[in-house]
Amino acid sequence: MPPHPPATVTWWENDQQRRLPWRDPGERRAVQVVVADDLTADAALRIATRGTGLLWRGDFRGARQLRDALRRRLARRGIRDDGDPRATYLRVRQAAAHRARVLGMVLIELDADDRVPLPHAPDVRRACREAFGPPVARSLIPLQAMLGAMGARQWRERGVAVPALGERIHPHHGVFAPTRSDYVDLVARAPLPDAGLAFDIGTGTGVLAAVLARRGVARVVATDVQPAAVVCARENLARLGLDDRVEVRRHDLFPRGRAGLVVVNPPWLPGTPHSPLEAGVFDPGGRLLARIVRQLPDHLTPGGEAWLVLSDLAELLGLRTRDALLAQFGRAGLVVRGRLDARPSPTPRPDDPLRHLRAQETVSLWRLGLAR
Ligand SMILES: C[S@@+](CC[C@H](N)C(=O)[O-])C[C@H]1O[C@@H](n2cnc3c(N)ncnc32)[C@H](O)[C@@H]1O
C-alpha cells in the first residue's frame, strides 16, 4: 500500500490561498490558520483556544515569546486537590491536554530543507530529520513540536547517565528515557535466576536489556512496538558492545517461545497517551498490563521468573487497586515469589496539586513465577 500522503492545511495570506503539509505526525492540528501579526498575547490566547493556528512571520525570538506568554496565561488556571485524587488527576490530565493543544497552535513554516526562514532562527535541520524523517517539501510545524525535536537532539547527543551500567544511554525522540534510576537499580540488584535466555518486553532505549546482558545473561531478546525504540535500542546496545548478545525486534509484547527470565517495565498509569513518548507512560484502560499478565505464563519456562516493574502511583491516585493487581496475577496462574521496592526521588512541580501523593510513590519489582 502506498504511504498516506501527509495531512495538509490551507489558509489565506496576502490575498492568496496557501496550502502546506504538516512536518510532524502529531495528532493535534490547527484546522484554520491566521498570520500572527500584531496580536496581543490575550488575543492570541483567544484565537489559539478556538483551535486556530497562529502562523509566526516575524523574528524567531518573538515566536518563543508568544509561546511563553501563552504558557504563563494557561498556567494561571491552577487546579486544587479537592480531596478526591482520581478526580483531581483527571482534571490535571485534561488541563495538560488543553495546554498542549493551545501551545501547539503557534506555527512556523519550514522550507524544503527544514530551514526556518526567520531572523534569529536556529538550525533545526538535524533535529527535525531525526524526529520526523527526511523533509520532502515546504511544511508547517507547531513551534512546540520543533522545540521538542531540538530538546530530543540534545538528549540523544549527550545521553543520560545510568549509574547501574556506569555508562550513558542515548534516547531518541519519542522514546522513553531512563531519567529515573530507581527502576533500573531494581533490575540491577534483583537476585538473578539461572536463565540462559531472557526477554525484555517494551525495551525502549534498551537500558534493561543492557543491564541483563551486563549481569551475565547469555542471550536477551528485546521487543518494542515503536519503530523509533527499536532503532534506538539497537544503537545503544551496539555502542555498549552488547549487540552480539541482545537481539532487538519490533514486536507486540512477547516473542515466540519461553525464557527463564522475562522483564517488563510497562506503562504504569491507566490513561490515554497523546504522543509516542506518553505511550511509554499511559496504558489505555490498563488493558496492556492485563494483556501482559495474561500472556506471561505462556512465555516462562517452568522454573522461570518474571520481573514486572510497576509503580504504585496508579493506586495512590485511585486508578487501580492493589487487590485488583493481585487478583490479575492469580487469575493468570502466577504466584508472587518476592518483591523489591524503591522510593523514587521525583522532583514534583510546585504547582502540581498531587505532589503529596507523588512523594509517597513506590516502584516495585514483582518477582512472579508459575503457580503449577
Ligand atoms: C515504561 S517504557 C519502558 C522502556 C524501557 N524498558 C525502560 O525500562 O526504560 C514502556 C515501553 O513499552 C513499549 N510498549 C508499549 N506497548 C507495547 C507493546 N504492545 N509491545 C511491546 N512494547 C510496547 C513502549 O514503546 C515503551 O518503550
Image (cartoon, rainbow, N blue to C red):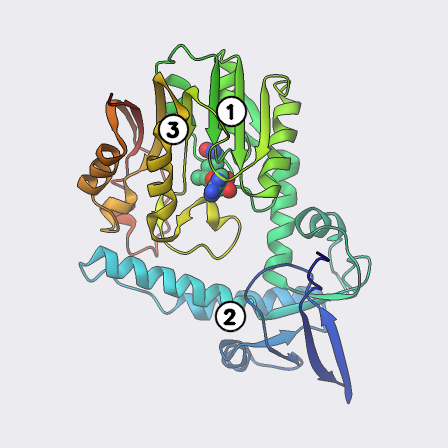
Which mark is on residue 102? 2
Q: Position of residue 115 (x, y in %)?
A: 79, 59
- The secondary element bearing badge 3 is classed as helix
Q: Position of residue 348 (x, y in %)?
A: 35, 47
Q: Position of residue 22 (x, y in %)?
A: 68, 65
Considering only vertical position in the picture, is 107 above or below 364?
below
Amino acid type of disc 1? Answer: Ala
- The secondary element bearing badge 2 is classed as helix
Judge left or right: residue 241 versus residue 102: right
Distance, label 3 to label 2, CA atoms, is 45 Å
Distance, label 1 to label 2, CA atoms, is 38 Å
Closer to the camera in the image, 242 or 142:
242
Q: Give the labeled residue for mark 3.
A: 298
Distance, label 1 to label 3, CA atoms, is 20 Å
Amino acid type of disc 2? Answer: Val
Ligand 1 closer than 8 Å to the CB at disc 1?
A: yes
Q: Position of residue 307 (x, y in %)?
A: 36, 26
Residue 311 can be seen, yes or no:
yes
